[in-house]
Amino acid sequence: LTTTGDLYTCGYGGSAVNGMGCLGHGNMESYQSPKLVNSLVEDGCYASDVHCGEYSMTVLTTEGEVLTCGTGSFGRLGNLETLDQLYLEPVEMIAGDDVVQIASGFAFSLALNKGGIVHAWGKNNEGQLGAGVGLAVDVYAMESLPTPIEGLLEGRKVTRIAAGHSHAAAVTSTGELFTWGMHMDHEPKLENSLLHTKIIDVACGQNYTLALDQEGRLYSLGKGKTGVLGLASTKMTTQPILVEGIPAGEKVVTMSAGWTHVACTTALSE
């Protein structure tokens, strides 16, 4: 994604078995170097963000519109059909929502609009759509149209969202952190242990979550198998724990959650 809003993609283009069109070039060819997605240029669209899932891609335009392409299995394109899309097409259900942030997991996506409401669509086998137990949660569970996430988020304004493999998280305007998915919570769960501070950002890796508070302190929770939680342990934790390995006198400014590893930048505390 360039500063002028042009989108370039490369890599695996898909197949008749896995689904095709995830690069947005109108075919299932693979490219070894970045190639401009010409269809966006032709339509006069400029991208502001892009997220890639398994064989699919979700794009946010500068106009607040969400576009998807690639395999349509499990409804991950958000357009009711489960057919593949070779080109980026609008997610019609939220076309007028003025979306400000997107996030994509393995086979599902989230969209946050200006009003602080989160919509989710795609695979729901582990409760990653936050729809509660009203929808069947099994290996075939899915939602092929964007569905607003309610539960405890209803009446709250969400400001940040993040998606992992099969779980997601959100931060509200008052600094609350909510998590769901991973076969643990099928609707947003308030992380009560963080109510003593104000969370301002969140990131999700494969099976874990990072939360950053306004003081620059980093918290982690989830599966720690690779030491990804930064807690000097590989054990799982279901509650956020302060990452104490950051040097004294420094605060975390930015963080990035990889599939099984983490990186963050710091600055000197005032």
Image: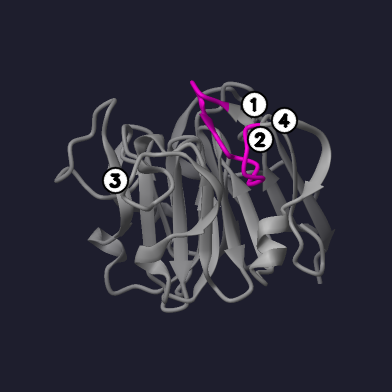
Amino acid on which the number 3 mark rests in the picture: Glu
Q: Give the distance between the C-alpha atoms of the residues marked 3 and 4, in whole angstroms.
A: 29 Å
Q: Is residue 87 magenta?
A: no
Give the side of residue 239 with respect to residue 151, left or right: right
Of the numbered discs 3 and 4, the one sitting upstream in the chain is 4
Q: Where residue 54 sits in the image (x, y, percent)?
A: 54, 33
Of the numbered discs 4 and 2, the one sitting upstream in the chain is 4
Q: Give the distance between the C-alpha atoms of the residues marked 1 and 3, in whole angstroms.
A: 33 Å
Give the side of residue 32 with respect to residue 50, left or right: right
Q: Looking at the image, which is closer to me, 56 or 177?
A: 56
**2 or 3: mark nearer the eye:** 3
Q: Which residue is mark 1?
A: 227
Q: Where residue 211 sits in the image (x, y, percent)?
A: 56, 53
Q: Which residue is mark 2?
A: 230
**3 or 4: mark nearer the eye:** 4
What secondary structure is found at the residue carrying circle 2?
loop
Q: How crowded is the residue under tag 4: few (<14 C-alpha within 10 Å), some, or many (20+)?
A: some
Q: Which residue is mark 3?
A: 143
Q: Give the distance between the C-alpha atoms of the residues marked 2 and 1, in whole angstroms.
A: 6 Å
Note whether residue 198 is visible. no
Q: Where residue 72 sits in the image (x, y, percent)?
A: 42, 39
Q: How crowded is the residue under tag 2: few (<14 C-alpha within 10 Å), some, or many (20+)?
A: many
| Magenta segment | 15-28
What secondary structure is found at the residue carrying circle 1?
loop
Q: Which residue is mark 4?
A: 30
Contact flag, marks 3 and 4 (Cβ < 8 Å): no
